[in-house]
Amino acid sequence: MTPPRLAIALTLEEGRSVSDGMGGGRLEWQPVGKLWGEMRSGSGRLQASGEGARSVVTWRILVRSAPASDPRRPKPGQRFALRDGLRHFLIDSVAEEDPQGRYLICIASEEGAA
């Protein structure tokens, strides 16, 4: 197996509910750690929503593995931020890439205006 090129700096973020002071709340993303990854785009689709059409692209993001107890191990529901938060990739699933557990494959969705 050829070692991957983990050349893209990613910030792993976790969403936390924060009170808005009026009885409601909002989701605020907090950094958990910095990771280096390899990214490959997958399929894309147009998704209709109440705010209009959105382009959704699936990405395969490979990162170095970490023990299950390590907060820097990605989990579904977290996201990666790229380029100082200009792009975000919501993590849909995480699986070990190889039998030795050296790398993790994160399938993530990037959303943007169509």
Image (spheres, rainbow, N blue to C red):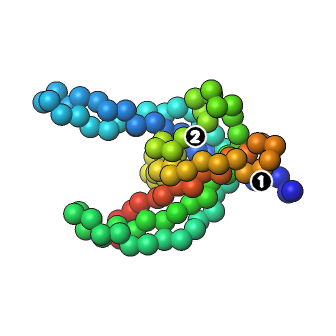
The residue indicated by pointer 2 is: 74
Percent of width and height locating residue 40: 63, 62
The residue indicated by pointer 1 is: 4
Percent of width and height locating residue 37: 66, 49
Residue located 39% across and 62% down the image: 112
Determine whether, in the image, residue 36 is placed left or right of residue 44: right
Location of the C terminus (image quadrant): bottom left
Q: Give the SS element for disc 1.
A: loop
Q: Which amino acid does label 1 sit on?
A: Pro
Location of the N terminus (image quadrant): bottom right
Residue located 53% across and 71% down the image: 43
Q: Along the line of sight, which residue is nearer the eye, 7 or 37?
A: 37
Q: How many labels does the image show?
A: 2
Q: Is residue 80 above or below residue 112?
A: above
Percent of width and height locating residue 62: 67, 51
Residue located 57% across and 55% down the image: 107
Q: Is residue 11 above or below residue 61?
A: above
Percent of width and height locating residue 5: 76, 53
Q: Along the line of sight, which residue is nearer the eye, 4 or 74?
A: 74
Residue 81 visible in rendering? no
Name the mark nearer the viewer: 1 or 2.
Answer: 2
Q: Is residue 104 above or below residue 68?
A: below
Q: Earlier in the sequence, mark 1 or mark 2?
A: 1
